[in-house]
Amino acid sequence: MWGARFCKEAWSPRSTPLGNYRQHISFAAALGGLYAWATYVFAGVHWLYGTVAALLTTLSGLLPDLDSQTGFGMKGFTGILGVLVALVVWQKMGDFNPEPAFEFHLWAVIAAFAMVRHGLRRIVGRLTVHRGMCHSIPTCAIWGAIAYLYYPTENQFLQIVMAVAVMTGYFSHLLLDEICSVDLKGARVNKAFGTALKFWAPSPWSTLATYVLLSYLTWRIIQVWPEGPLILTPPTPPKIPITLPENLQILFPGSEIEP
């Protein structure tokens, strides 16, 4: 069966019966590609936005392991995440009126990168235990809310697309951990089974803090939610400073330079 083959390595004598870095990123990347294709075919989302959604899905497949203090792969992941956060900070700084000086932009970007690259895992690691509330459904919703609130766009439909992408990748990690906690071939269940797809942790304080943060982010979304009926209109195609060959333009319409 698929689950048994995919998690065979996880049940080897030298490993822990949980999804590892390679499995998580592969599974999330596959879902990201499928999600990008679905948004393009069924919702008319431009292929460039779709590639970003696929990237967010892939990276979010590693987010639950921010509470892990080991692993070379997670160090590389926090580096990529730091770059993405720095880009968002740079974009958001341009919304200030008057716009801050370039030097302020520069230091803000450096601080954002350093905070994510070197501080995020340490902070999360000190506040949580591995497979605590970081591996839970409410935290999955928290990251989706963060993506909705801070993805740099004014198009609500695109905000929702990116938020769903983040939650899809995050949920894929939790689901894979549960799948790999069950040895389908040997009919065994590991003691870690049930610790990923959960709504609370043994620690009441971490559970309370998670729901307080989720409530705050939900309130923020309600505050910025547009009035009136929900109208999901795909964003206009972005301006791209390149022109694809004609044969590729057939596959990716709207990729030409706009005047």
Image: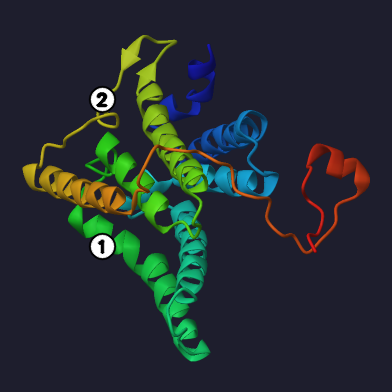
Q: Is residue 211 left or right of residue 121?
A: left
Q: Quadrant of residue 185?
A: top left
The dot on residue 63 is none
Q: Amino acid at mark 2?
A: Gly
Q: Is residue 19 visible?
A: no
Q: Is residue 212 left or right of residue 20?
A: left
How many residues crowd mark 2 within 10 Å: few (<14), some (14–19), many (20+)? some
Q: Amino acid at mark 1?
A: Ile
| C-beta proximity under 8 Å, tags 2 and 1 | no
Along the line of sight, the residue nearer the viewer: 239 or 113: 239
State which tag comes first along the sequence, 2 or 1: 1
Q: Could you give the CA–CA distance between mark 2 and mark 1, rounded to whole angstroms?
A: 25 Å
Residue labelled with disc 1: 123
* Picture residue at 7% right of the left edge, 42% below the top: 204
The dot on residue 194 is 2
**Residue 93's spot in the image, x, y percent?**
45, 76
Q: Is residue 150 visible?
A: yes
* Picture residue at 17% right of the left edge, 44% below the top: 211
* Picture residue at 45% right of the left edge, 39% below the top: 164
Q: How is the image coloured?
A: rainbow
Q: Is residue 33 left or right of residue 208?
A: right
Q: Element at badge 1?
A: helix
**Residue 250's spot in the image, x, y percent?**
85, 38
